[in-house]
Structures are given as C-alpha cells and as structure tokens.
C-alpha cells in the first residue's frame, strides 16, 4: 500500500492513490460501468463548479496544458458519497470517511491536477527540484505548494475526474493557506516555469474543463 503524503486516510485520497483500505475499512473495487445514482449527479455539479483548465502555447506550438479541481469541503464530501454509492459502503463507513475528509482539509487547500506537456521530461511537478512552481493567489495573499504527489490514473480517478486524458500525469497538490476562506471568492492556481505560466482561474470567467478528445 502506498501511503498518502502526510494526510489522514481520507476517502478521496484512497481513491486517488489506489490504496487498499480506508482506516481499516476494506476497499471494494469499482465496476467497469459504476452505478449511476443520486450521488453521481450531485458530485458532477460540485466537481464542475470547482474545476478549471488552462493551456500554454509558444506561438502555434502547444507546450502544455493543465486541468484541475479544487478539493473544497463540498467536493470532498460529494466525492465520499459518490464512492460510497459505487462501492456499497455502509452509513458507518461513509460517516468515518467524511470525518477524515474534513479533518484532512485542515492541512491546507488541496487540488487534483491533470497535466500534459509536449516534452514528457517537463511533466515533473513532483520533482525535487521541478521546472514548475505552483502558487495559490487570491489577489491579496499568495502561498506556494508545500507538497505535490504524482498519482496513478486508475479507473476510479478517471471516473471521478473525466477530464484526465491518456497523455496526462495526475498530481495531488497541497497548499498551506493562511488567507481568507476561498469559498465564494475568485482565486488563481498558477503553474509557472521558464516555459511559461498557466493559470487556473477559479473566478466566473475561468475556462471550464472538458473531456479529452477520443477521436471521431
């Protein structure tokens, strides 16, 4: 089992890492076509409202793009309900997972990022050092990412975040945020390097995510 960096065993973290247990609760593998119930629509609404994308070009050359979701408390709780619906958790299992989700959120603002780079060696957000610097900016205060971990884009991740493409690398990012609460306010997550900068604009004018092109 690969542990989640410095975090409680929250349900969403388990889904993203492919970890086999949740605080002693056995993980039940999702089916190829998971059940579509009330939690599916609820999570989709929360995820879409908290997801943005940006691209980086050098003239006509496409250098990179990033799509990401802010794991707000609402998104994390909705994700727990979605996983419970897919995997058939009991009410006790769901309550335990949601309590862990909220506790983990106290460590900082968390994001899931799906990143594509034309040159794969530049897709190193988790590198030490990395060519990229990640920063959260609300126009008043700024904070750099404290941790970045590369994730496996397994079936659960692809169902939770359908904008992840076949050439993307998925990362979990934690930013220790001491500014005002972000809920209901515009802010930017900036991913910058010598190649250029991409800004996920979580204000009303930010670009929404889209599913990857799958051919005609």
Image (cartoon, grey):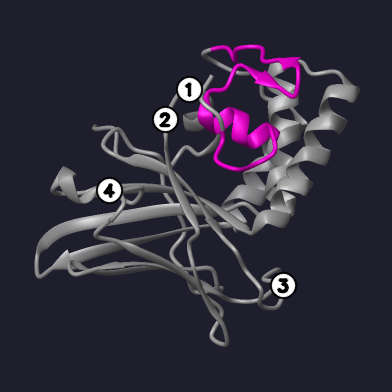
Q: Which residue is mark 4?
A: 124
The label on residue 73 is none
Distance, label 1 to label 4, CA atoms, is 22 Å
Question: What's the magenta bit mostly, secondary-structure-wise?
Answer: loop
Q: Label 3: few (<14), some or many (≥20) within 10 Å?
A: few
User: Mark 4 or mark 2, which is nearer the start of the sequence?
Assistant: 4
Neighbourhood count class around disc 1 (C-alpha, 10 Å): few under 14, some 14–19, many 20 upward: some
Q: Are marks 2 and 4 in contact (CB under 8 Å)?
A: no
Check residue 141 for magenta coloring.
Answer: no
Dot placed on the residue nearer the N-terminal end, 1 or 3: 1
Q: Is residue 77 left or right of residue 200?
A: right
On screen, residue 44 above or below 207? above
Q: How many marks?
A: 4
Q: Which residues are magenta?
A: 4-31
Residue 216 in the figure: left or right of residue 2: left
Residue bearing the label numbered 1: 155
User: Residue 66 location, x and y as percent?
Assistant: 35, 54
Chain-order first, disc 3 or disc 2: 2
- Is the N terminus in the top left, top right, bottom left or bottom right quadrant? top right
Tell me the number on the disc at residue 181. 3
């Amino acid at each position: 089992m690969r542990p989640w960096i410095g975090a409680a065993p929250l349900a969403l973290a388990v889904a993203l890492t492919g970890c086999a247990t949740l605080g002693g609760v056995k993980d039940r593998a999702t089916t190829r076509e998971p059940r579509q119930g009330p939690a599916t629509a609820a999570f989709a609404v929360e995820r879409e409202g908290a997801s943005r994308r940006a691209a980086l070009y050098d003239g006509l050359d496409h250098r990179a793009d990033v799509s990401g979701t802010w794991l707000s408390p609402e998104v994390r709780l909705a994700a727990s309900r979605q996983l419970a619906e897919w995997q058939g958790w009991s009410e006790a299992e769901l309550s335990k997972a949601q309590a862990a989700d909220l506790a983990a959120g106290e460590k900082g603002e968390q994001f899931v990022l799906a990143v594509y780079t034309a040159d794969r060696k530049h897709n190193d957000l988790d590198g030490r050092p990395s060519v990229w610097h990640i920063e959260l900016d609300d126009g008043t205060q700024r904070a750099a990412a404290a941790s970045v971990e590369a994730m496996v884009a397994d079936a659960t991740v692809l169902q939770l975040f359908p904008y992840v493409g076949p050439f993307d690398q998925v990362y979990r990012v934690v930013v220790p945020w001491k500014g005002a609460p972000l809920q209901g306010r515009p802010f930017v997550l900036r991913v910058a390097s010598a190649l250029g900068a991409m800004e996920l604009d979580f204000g009303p004018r930010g670009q929404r995510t889209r599913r990857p092109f799958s051919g005609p």
